[in-house]
Amino acid sequence: MSEPKGLPPSLLDLSQYSDDGLKVLVVEDNDSDFELMCYRLKQGGLKYTATRVDRIEDLRRCLEHEEWQVVISDHNLPGFGSEEALRIVRDSGLDIPFIIVSGSIGEHVAVEAMRAGADDYLMKDKMARLVPAIERSLRAANERRSLAAAEQAQRESERRFAAIAENIPGIIFQMHSGPSLPRPTVPFVSEGVIRLFGVPPRLFLENPNYFFEQFAADDAASLFEMLLEPPQAGTHLTWEGRLKPHGKYSERWVLMNAVAKARGNMFVWDGVLLDISDRKEAENHLLNAQTELRRVTTEFEKRREQERGAIAREIHDDMGGSLTKLKADVAWLNKNLSLDTPAAEKLDDMLELIEHLLASSQRIAKDLRPGILDYGLIPALDWQMKDFQKRTQIQGEFQSNVEELQLDPELSTALFRILQEALTNIVKHAQATRVDVELFVTENELSLEVRDNGRGIENADKLKDTSFGLRGMQERVAAFDGWVDVSGSTGSGTTVMVSIPRGNQTDEAEND
């Protein structure tokens, strides 16, 4: 914002003007009176430059082309008077002090001139008051300028505030709470309430409790509960709640952010209430999509395990049985043929190949679905741990606080696969020399803990795009409303903790 022209940088020290001093424009038709004014200015110790005009055209021209700090005008001039000179100065838009000097001016005329905007008036026989009158007028002009600048800044601030309040998807509000109030009140809301609540602001101003009546009852109760505790100065409040349905809206969500400041025996909250219905709707869509994806994934895993089991049984029963019979037949032929014939040597090769095929079919069937799972989860986990030690030479131990446990086959398979994935990750990444596995069963939940003494895991490792093993474990556990936690630090090993609610699962038998 540009400052009004024609005002000095200081009102109290007139020596701080430009090298030419105070620029004074004198509207006077008498040379002697003009010289007397200049004498009084010099006598008052004022450094100045003065220009005299006695025609309206010259006054307008000077105001248009030069900057002036003060205008001194005679009351009566040929063809015009101080009233017209004052009007021309004010119409120019310049906030320049205007002082009337007259040989004869009535009190009524002087009062009217002051009302019209003159800063002061004095008689020509009392010119000793000229310099004090100038200084006082400059001071008043500077105060006007400061006040105008403050008002302009206030208007600009209010304009920006109104623009912000108008464009945010919600409202700006002020809330009062504290021990001196029976309940929190909201004495101010911005115009956005029309868009957010569908009612005019006056309803909120007439009833300070009306604000809270717009929320769903249980959500309003949660907000009141948060406001019961006296906050510290600068405390931030964050709350989410639902609005009561109105108009075409069935349910909408809002987010409140406010900061408190103490005022006497109460707290004043300045905050915003934002409409987050779109965000909530997107979150619900995402949650529903995740739930549907988890349901599909769970069903996929279930069917895949069923297919694995069916293939494993086919391999075991059909292929394994056929290979066993073929082995017996080849052994019979080998026994009844002469040992020194070429056919006997060929039969030995066939027996070796059949043995290899039998071992491969057993291994494939075990990988598809270990038959040990048919004996229960605990024997299956114990066998898996022993098989892991045998294959990798990594020492370890499996412990359980129960000896037998009957679970849904799908849950047993999921826990078996989770331990299988955890052990695979240890072989691939941990560089561990020991692994301990513990199954802990309570009435309400089932926990599986896998600890190793390897190199540890960092958060960045868990967030890698290629961490499919961890994600697979999380998806398996989420299907049973459980959770997985993977923790560790460099050089201190890694711990995988799995917890799943028991639900209706019961133990067949626990430790004696």
Image (cartoon, rainbow, N blue to C red):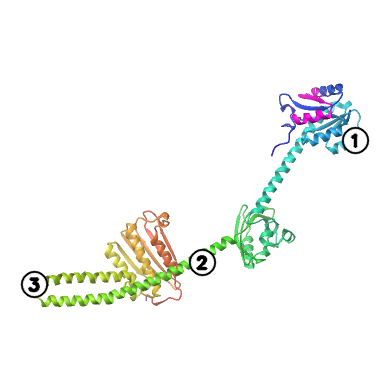
Q: CA distance from mark 3 to mark 2?
A: 72 Å
Q: Which numbered dot is residue 109?
A: 1
The N terminus - image quarter: top right
Of the numbered discs 3 and 2, the one sitting upstream in the chain is 2
Marker count (numbered)? 3
Lower position in the chain sequence, tag 1 or tag 2: 1
> Given this view, does label 3 or label 2 mark the residue nearer the observer?
3
Residue where numbered disc 3 is placed: 341
Residue 347 counted in the magenta span: no
Q: Which residues are magenta?
A: 40-68
Q: Is residue 161 left or right of residue 294?
A: right
Q: Is residue 73 visible?
A: yes
On whether residue 44 falls in the magenta region, the answer is yes
Is residue 504 depicted above or below 189 in this figure? Answer: below
Identify the residue position indicated by label 2 in the image: 288
SS for callout 3: loop
